[in-house]
Amino acid sequence: MALAFDEFGRPFIILRGQEQKSRLRGLDAQKANISAGKAVARILRTSLGPKGMDKILQSPDGDVTITNDGATILEQMDVDNQIAKLMVELSRSQDYEIGDGTTGVVVLAGALLEQAEGLLERGIHPIRVAEGYEMACRIAVEHLEHIAQKFEFGVTNIEPLVQTCMTTLSSKIVNRCKRSLAEIAVKAVMAVADLERRDVNLDLIKVEGKVGGKLEDTELIHGIVVDKDMSHPQMPKHIEDAKIAILTCPFEPPKPKTKHKVDIDTVEKFQTLRLQEQKYFDDMVQKCKDVGATLVICQWGFDDEANHLLMHRNLPAVRWVGGVELELIAIATVREGGVYTPCILRGHRFLAGLVREKSFGTTKDRMLYIERCANSRAVTIFVRGGNKMIIEETKRSIHDALCVARNIIRNNSIVYGGGSAEISCSIAVEAAADKYPGVEQYAIRAFGDALDSIPMALAENSGLQPIETLSAVKSQQIKDNNAYCGIDCNDVGTYDMREQNVFETLIGKQQQILLATQVVKMILKIDDVISPTDY
């Protein structure tokens, strides 16, 4: 881009290769950006809530994904428009920070853009709209603090956490098993949580899946599940009080790293070489046995001769175990406060109460269970399901539930769901709008109307009359001064979300409003779009 002047001194802009570029300015640019954002929000709107619809996405390789998780849908969509990409980033940042509410944040941003479009057409400057939205956002976030409740929970009382996770899982494909999956997620989080520091390391929770069985067969294992079996079929499949040697080095005679050549011209020389290798490997096995190891887990492989020797020396072994799994096994089996000793060939000895091999179905698929560990701070959620798509969707749902349980441990404030928090914020924002004398008042009112789009979408997706239902709930909230009335999506017969046990985390809801407002402000401030044409 360059600035030039004509003979009368009037400036004009020259674009390099301008015949290959299209340019939108002013209101046209803002309207084009808003329509792109609304298009993305419209796709996700039908996936909101417990009765939300699923989307089927096919990758170029032919892999099929069925999900109603907002972040996953947008991640796998092929989006070209830059503003639409901002909406994808918005959903991703909500997923990274909170883990839940990825659909709602995009629907809210789409509603804010829709309201802004009406204000821009009435001649209000986009900066004034953005400022009004910022004021309204502040009011809404403060009001959420005001209506939030503290949830007391402990190691023995995990029911509040389970109820919150059930709300998250109710909008997923796995909602028929939401009680059992919520309990599994909460127990997994409590097993790895540091309640004194209010911190949870989700890396210690491994989610593993296997096709076959029912969704109800999903279980929590206080230990590690490894998708491997014993290296030799005649090795024992059940080892009590196992002392594990974890080896991160090749369990075989070393090979020179430089180019080398061995000339063997007689049988005696070959026998000598073979015996030397066998002795070397025997020494390695003996070192493991000397420190009391009853099972070897090796990151690298070993050949069939080595496998045969291990079997004859009564030392069961597992080979080709991944680095991440090795780390989790080490965390789970090291003694509490113990040191990684004694060192064996850069490996360490760990303790597990039970190591067993389990086979599944008629396919003879085998997996290794390492249970009753010395330190149960690493756990595994083992998911079963009818097909690969169900397992992948269940893993995503469990991830959301784990994130919600972690958020409650970090900050135990909750707000009630079913759109009740949004309706309450909408009423508060509209009431506060009268205190602002400037043009921003219009934007603040528009923000309140946009907040109503979430309960409206919930009612629409549940097959209810959206405007009629929203009006009834809103009037009941105003009449009773009750911030807990929301949309009765499950036809329970009451609008009170406390009776329905529908909760959401306060930080998740605040993050939704803050992120959506920031992205909308950014989109409204763009007034010039220069992009290459399609040809």
Image (cartoon, helix red, strand yellow):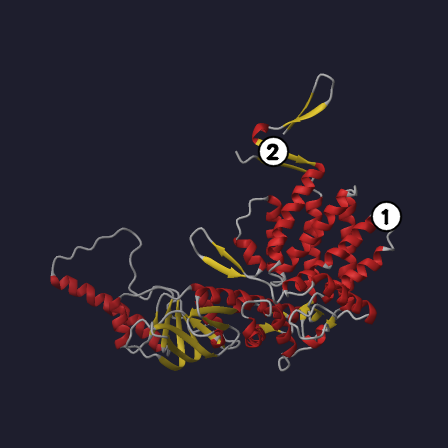
Does residue 55 appear to the left or right of 258 in the view shown? Answer: right
Residue 134 x, y percent position in the rendering: 76, 52
Quarter of the view holding residue 482 = bottom right
Q: Residue furthest top?
A: 7
In the image, residue 394 above or below residue 152: above
Quarter of the view holding residue 190 = bottom right
Residue type at mark 1?
Gly
The answer to whether residue 140 is visible is yes
Does residue 535 appear to the left or right of 150 in the view shown? Answer: left
Q: How many residues crowd around disc 2 within 10 Å: few (fewer than 14), some, or many (20 or more)?
A: few
Task: Tell me the residue at 53%/66% (across/down).
Answer: 203
The answer to whether residue 137 is visible is no
Task: Tell me the residue at 73%/58% (across/down).
Answer: 451
The label number, if any, that marks residue 216 in the structure image: none
- Relative to the observer, which residue lies in front, 324 or 337? 324
In the image, residue 188 above or below residue 254: below
The residue wearing badge 2 is 22
Which comes sooner in the sequence, label 1 or label 2?
A: 2
Q: How many residues crowd around disc 1 within 10 Å: few (fewer than 14), some, or many (20 or more)?
A: few
Q: Secondary structure at mark 2?
A: strand
In the image, residue 243 above or below residue 13: below
The residue wearing badge 1 is 438
Residue type at mark 2?
Ser
